[in-house]
Amino acid sequence: MTSTTPIRRSTARDRVRHCTAGSSATAGMPRDDAHDRLRRSVGGRIDDVVVLARRTAELASLLPQIAPGEVVVLEAGGRSRAVTADARSVVATRSIDETITLLEAELVRAPAALVVVEAVSAATGEVLPIGRLAAAAHRHDARILVDAARLLPHRAVSLTSWGIDYALISSRVLDVPFDVTALIGRADWLAASDRATPTTPTAVAVDAFASAVDQLATIGFEQLGYREYALHKRLDAGLGRLPGVRSLSAFDDPLDRVGMVALAVDGREADDVVRQLTVRHGIAGCDSGPVTPGRTGRAVRLQVGLGTTFDDVDRLLRALGGSAVAAA
């Protein structure tokens, strides 16, 4: 939901100046203000800044546009939103080690200022090894921008521990009645820019976003992880007993998985399976999308999160096992 009230467009320098104030204990701006709460929620450094926007697409393109050099994007299940038209691409393979080798080879072939990665594969929900990717970028004097929006509701994010220069997070994946996107990270590139920043969300919207993130921390990311692991384990075991139903992965490496399960039903188009699950069986939170880079076809994607119960998993398995969905 987005306000229609016209707002002033400011420069990136104006926004960074404002956000820097929000990250320090200055008069009239306490340390626990919403900007600082968002910075701390992703383990930001004390001098990191927070730039906010109403629309994700506006902020996602900001840093690649102002980076003082070329941009390389790692594609691991869908092209990142945080890219420019002239960005160079490295397509992930089935091996994490090989993917990192290809990324470094591209940075050796032609230097880049910024590497853009998504923390979670949009195709399968697998979590990429962000710390290793950040180290690879830094070895070649590049900074890294991580789109962590899909990871935020499921796992703790830490710019400091993982060596991330910039992270992108969004309220769209949380139960927040406002659209707010935050770009959090080092101030120098943003402060050196005179480009107009995106439309600024209201203070109420920003506070609601920060409160939702605070609530996740109150529940505890460790508890969230244990619960989601149990749901995935139950779902994987059930899928393994269904003939003609296969779980899909982007990588051969055993990676953590959050937010979704990707699968295929032999002899059935993914869109047809989704229609059967939603219309005939009333299964919510499923859609279809590209499988992985380098592979044709589409996958059935099933959402798994805080609101998912074991009963939901069992109901889904019964629906997949029915003759209306599974191939004979």
Image (cartoon, rainbow, N blue to C red):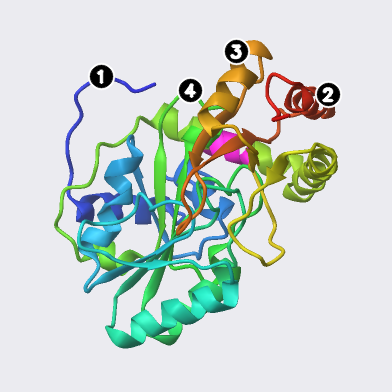
State the quadrant of the N terminus. Answer: top left
**Which residue lies under the disc numbered 1?**
4
**Which residue lies under the disc numbered 2?**
311
**Which residue lies under the disc numbered 4?**
177
Mark 4 belongs to which amino acid?
Pro
Q: Quadrant of residue 232?
A: top right
Where residue 58 appears, x then y in whole percent? Answer: 27, 43
N-terminal-most mark, 1 or 2 = 1
In the displayed orientation, state which residue is furthest to the front.
Answer: 328
Apparent side of residue 187 relative to residue 314 in the rendered image (left or right):
left
Residue at 65% across, 54% down = 156
In the image, 292 versus 134, the foreground residue is 292
**Which residue lies under the disc numbered 3?**
279
- 304 in the magenta segment: no
In the image, 296 versus 293, the foreground residue is 296
N-terminal-most mark, 3 or 1 = 1
Where residue 168 appears, x then y in whole percent? Answer: 43, 52
Labels 1 and 2 touching (C-beta < 8 A):
no
How packed mark 4 is, by other alpha carbons closer than 10 Å (few <14, some 14-19, many 20 or more), is: few
Q: Mark 3 against mark 1, which lies toward the viewer?
A: 3
